[in-house]
Image: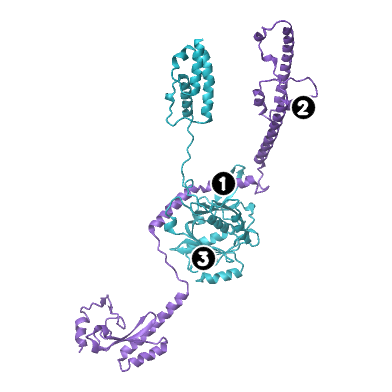
Amino acid sequence: MQHDDVIWDLIGNKSFCSYKVKTKTQQFCRNEYNITGLCNRSSCPLANSQYATVREEKGLCYLYMKVIERAAFPARMWEKVKLDRNYAKALEQIDENLIYWPRFIRHKCKQRLTKITQYLIRIRKLTLKRQRKLVPLSRKVERREKRREEKALIAAQLENAIEKELLDRLKQGTYGDIYNFPIHAFDKAMEKQEEDTESEEEEEEDEEESGTREFVAEDEFEESDLSDFEGSSDEEEDDEEVSSEEEETEEELEEEKTKAKSKGKAPLKGPIRKKRAYVEIEYEQETEPAQKSKAT
Amino acid sequence: MDSNEATTSESVSKKKGKTKKVKRKVKHDEAPVQEMEQAEGEETEKKSESGPCFPPTFSVSEIKNKQRRHSMFLKLKEEKRKAPPKEVPKTIENQRIYDETTVNPEDEEVAFDEGTDEFSAYFNRLTNPKVLITTSDRPRGRTVRFCEQLATVIPHAHVYYRRGLALKRVIPQCVSRGFTYLMVINEDRKVPNGLVLCHLPDGPTAHFKVSNVRLRKEMKRRGKDPTEHVPEVILNNFTTRLGHSIGRMFAALFPHDPQFVGRQVATFHNQRDFIFFRFHRYIFKNEKKVGIQELGPRFTLKLRSLQKGTFDSKFGEYEWVHKRHEMDSSRRKFHL
């Protein structure tokens, strides 16, 4: 038979019990079958041969009763009774099973059942609400991300990018007429027009060059070369030289004139002209000024 | 006559390419030979200019002909003397692994998709944006102030206190009241750290990580508070398909017609998958210079996931999720 008092003397007040947790003011019992959780003479499951508890497993409540006749087989010592889900019926069940048991145990079992049902209800309510999910952060990853962000910020050069974008929008004209900075755009438009006219004139020149006849001037031959020929050819050459010289001077004047005319417009005309080794013979006619600008 | 024969033989051998016994004869017959050589030198130069067809082990010292060797050497020296072409430095943006989903501006498929996706209603000017800003449960002061400042930056934005409401219940109410966007700022340890941006009539939901939040009073040299004018929007560097859809998402936050009178601009700049948000006021000093002054809050976003449909973390269909092990392994690979 179990000697409860002896057991209590051994493990109870101010003795060692492995389930005992001592704090400043109170002693607790860590035994899983303990009904109140405190270390008392009436609450100790080891020191009471008649003992019962209510425990909860996966949302269902069970009444555990200690059968002292099986003290020799601790694994089979506790009997389990499943309690009804209905709170009132469960209380009646407890009363039924623990009839003729001490008042203390019956009362504490019912109290424990009440508490358990209350917290089960609370669990069910909370699961319906939103739950805060705690996501673990990896410190290494966080540090790495932070560093990459700093570097990306430096690489982004935000102010420059924003300014560039705003200026592009201004140039494109998305702002309409709000800002009065049309000069730059106007200059650009003028330049564009000039380039267009230049290209047109170049094309015209090329076309005409292919059509015009090229006369090789006799001026380029030096007199020393001509010294071999004698006789009537001298006179002719002289005349030709004189005439060609006159034409040369005329042409130089014309070149200067056309250069003066085309100062602002077509700077490309100059180098093109210089490349030509030949000289075109022109006739003195007053109607030519328009033609001259085209031909040269 | 001997000189003539010599010149002819030299010319023949030169035309073949490399010459052998030329030195002595060159000294004798310099004048005519020089002309020949110059002419041939020009030819060879032309040939070399036309295409460098030298064998790889060629060096200037191997030419036996002194004149030509000299001219080649001078040419080489001149080329070296010219500054070497400036090398382009390697940057992460240069070395970025080419993403096959990069959008080509003329792509018809993309244009078609954009014409029929959830934002098409906005871009066709059928709807005006109306934004609801809220937080997670029990926000702390910093988050609350951040929400307020966001509401001033984004026109037609309303801040509502959360009060423990479930988002799934909030969304139908928002839709019924005509909101187009729901913005939820998540808070952790008194600091905003997450943003859920949900386009409302069953639009995509984007979840971002928020970092480096700077409120207005923490800004250096900031201007006055933003006015009620509708700001312009700048979206930079959204190249891939994913980036494109995110960019459109940001664009649809703001009303269509910016009021240029207000001179305010909101910028979303993507750099290496970090989206930097800035809010500035600009002023054009002349046609080549613009001054900007930072006004409102600034923060950076990093996309965590993009989900089709409104907020549903369990059963939603995710278009894109950031998977750390797969996507963070390469330093040159970016997704936005």
Disc 1: host chain = A
Type of residue at label 2?
Answer: Ala
**Residue A116 place in picture, x, y as percent:** 38, 82
Type of residue at label 3?
Answer: Glu
Disc 3: host chain = B
Give the labeled residue for mark 3: B317
For marks 2 and 1 on the same chain, the one whose residue lies earlier in the sequence: 1
Label 3 to label 1: alpha-carbon separation: 39 Å
Give the labeled residue for mark 1: A163
Type of residue at label 1?
Answer: Glu
Colour used to depict chain B in the structure image:
cyan
**Residue A10 place in picture, x, y as percent:** 19, 82
Q: Quadrant of residue B170?
A: bottom right
* B144 on left or right of A282: left
Disc 2: host chain = A
The chain coloured purple is A
Taking depth in this image into account, of A162 and B84 the one nearest to the observer is B84
